[in-house]
Amino acid sequence: MSQKLHIFAVSDSVGETAEKIAIASALQFDVERNVTRFSRVNKEEQVRNIVSQAVEEGAIIVYTIVKPELSKYLENYAAEQGIVAVNVLDPLLKVIESKIGLQPAYISGLTHAMDDQYFNRMKAIEFTIEHDNGQNLENIHEANLIILGLPRTSKTPLAMHLANLGIKVANYPIVIDTEIPQEIINLKGKVPMVGLTIDIDTLMKLRQERMRSFDLPEDIESLDEMVAEELDNAYRIYARLKCLVIDVTMDDIETIGNTITHKFTLPLRVTHHRC
């Protein structure tokens, strides 16, 4: 029995998936191991050359060729030459097809499209951190969404949740004397805007906690009056900017995020079921 193991990882894309599977499998055996990756294999001539090399080196072929015709050609040609070739995608594709009743798209390189989504998501997260709580207004026009909200309406957690879906979010705080900067006013009707609010009783409790450390403004006679004015100012701003107004009192961040992405047809809608 041979004490050497050589695996060819063959793909019609870059071949990372086939290579990782080959490496993970080879590491389970205490022998001399070698893995060779062949990428961008999309012609029968390439397949024949690879199989011929496998014959010379006694290699096993592991492949992730999604095009059915070329995949079948490799399978048949390898069998004719006495080479074991394992299609590592085919069993799972068949199970998924049977489960959902749809056929695979057979598009090469989709994992790298997912890589692009990953980098876009990282850019969205970076943008959202840089535009938290009214920062960096000079390029706020690059946002996919602007969130305005009273304190304690979870502006930042909501913004970060949406950023993790690849949405660039800027958020801006609304307090009793807030005047919206011109940079945001100029984006009315151009960038989707959401105004967050909570019910008056919840806001009152939050303000009562805050007032333990701070005095009321001189022109405000009572906490009730302050809270009412704070809400009135927020609603005036939301009406002026034509914001989608969302009461966050009862709903969790994921539900609110789904409402926003659905309303504005933003990139993704994600539901998380906690067990």
Image (tube, rainbow, N blue to C red):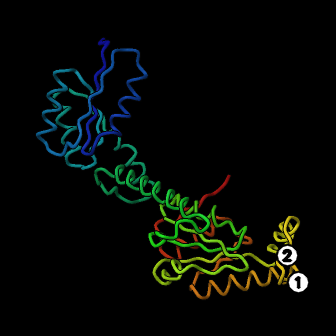
At 74% from the left edge and 72% from the top edge, which residue is drawn?
Answer: 249
Badge count: 2
Q: Is residue 34 above or below residue 208?
A: above
At 53% from the left edge and 82% from the top edge, which residue is drawn?
Answer: 185
Q: Nearer the viewer, residue 7 or 134?
A: 134
Amino acid carrying label 1: it is Glu
The quarter of the displayed image where residue 38 is located: top left
Q: Is residue 52 above or below residue 5?
A: below
Q: Nearer the viewer, residue 180 or 239?
A: 180
Looking at this view, name the residue that lies furthest to the front. 218
Is residue 197 rendered to the left or right of residue 66?
A: right
Is residue 38 rendered to the left or right of residue 257?
A: left
Location of the N terminus (image quadrant): top left
The quarter of the displayed image where residue 227 is located: bottom right
At 74% from the left edge and 70% from the top edge, which residue is drawn?
Answer: 250
The residue where tag 1 is placed is 221
Q: Residues within 10 Å of mark 1 (few under 14, many from 20)?
A: few
Q: Is residue 26 above or below residue 202?
A: above
Residue 23 position, x and y percent, is 37, 28
Label 1 element class? loop
Label 2 element class? loop
Return the mark for residue 47: none
Marks 2 and 1, how far apart at CA: 8 Å
Residue 151 position, x and y percent, is 72, 70
Residue contact at pointers 2 and 1, CB within 8 angstroms = yes
Looking at this view, name the residue that lies furthest to the left. 45
Return the mark for residue 216: 2
Residue 99 position, x and y percent, is 45, 54
